[in-house]
């Protein structure tokens, strides 16, 4: 089942930080403010720290006839400062299509400190034929990165998103992949 595989991969990546996937562990972004009361304290900008340049990257799989681009090239944020960025997805086909985005953060050592508050990743996005939609990403860099020796000298972070066509028919029903007899 495609959903089970995607869900399992998502959990593995979020637990281990594999592939530059930001870790969703207690105290490091991910869940809601109710899950982590200390999280509210983490989104206070560290005003005496250096700003970190966050750049945005977007791509689509070869079989998905969408255009997918970041609306801004970069933002500069302080650790603990929230930022809002937008991507635009356009379905270039004459059919409704469901897509799913994955993401990663580079360099990989930043992943545990990149905390998304709201994002469109790992959720099905259905775009009508020729439709364009804006997709927000609300995030912050956890101030704990300032204490990590591996983060010394890191002044730039890249947020990478890739959209894939979901394995469903155009009506949103799971599409079995034929197997040889």
Image (cartoon, rainbow, N blue to C red):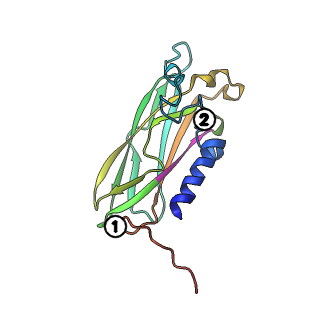
Asked whether residue 133 is drawn in magenta, I would say: no
Query: Can you identify the residue that label 1 sits on?
Result: 171
Along the viewing direction, whichever of 172 and 37 lies nearer the viewer: 37
Residue 6's spot in the image, x, y percent? 54, 56
Asked whether, in this view, residue 57 is left or right of residue 108, the answer is left
Direction bottom: furthest residue: 181
Task: Name the residue rendered at 38%, 58% in the picture.
Answer: 66
Report the number of discs.
Answer: 2
Q: Specify the quadrant of the image occupied by residue 181.
A: bottom right
Task: Name the element at disc 1.
Answer: loop
**Residue found at the very far front of the displayed protein:** 34
Mark-to-mark CA distance, 2 and 1: 36 Å
Residue count near mark 2 (Cα–Cα under 10 Å), binned few <14, some 14–19, many ≥20: some
> Tag 1 or tag 2, which sits nearer the N-term?
2
- Magenta residues? 101-107
Please name the predominant secondary structure of the magenta segment in the image: strand
**Residue found farthest to the top:** 48
> Is 42 placed above or below 98 here?
above
Residue marked by disc 2: 25
Res. 143 image quadrant:
top right
User: Where does the image place residue 20, in percent across and percent down from the top left?
Assistant: 61, 43
């Amino acid at each position: 089942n495609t959903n089970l595989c995607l869900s399992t991969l998502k959990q593995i990546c979020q637990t281990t930080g594999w592939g530059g996937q930001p870790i969703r562990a207690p105290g490091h972004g991910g869940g809601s403010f109710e899950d982590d009361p200390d999280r509210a304290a983490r989104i206070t900008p560290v005003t005496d720290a250096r700003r970190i340049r966050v750049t945005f990257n977007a791509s689509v799989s070869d079989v998905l006839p969408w255009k997918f681009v970041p609306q801004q090239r970069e933002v500069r944020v302080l650790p603990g400062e929230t930022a809002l960025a937008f991507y635009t997805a356009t379905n270039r086909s004459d059919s409704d299509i469901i897509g799913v985005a994955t993401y990663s953060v580079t360099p990989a050592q930043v992943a545990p400190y990149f905390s998304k508050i709201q994002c469109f990743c790992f959720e099905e996005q259905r775009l009508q034929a020729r439709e364009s939609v804006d997709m927000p990403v609300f995030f912050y860099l956890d101030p704990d990165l300032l204490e990590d020796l591996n983060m010394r000298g890191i002044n730039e972070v890249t947020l990478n998103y890739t959209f894939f066509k979901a394995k469903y028919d155009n009506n949103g029903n799971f599409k079995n992949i034929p197997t040889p007899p």
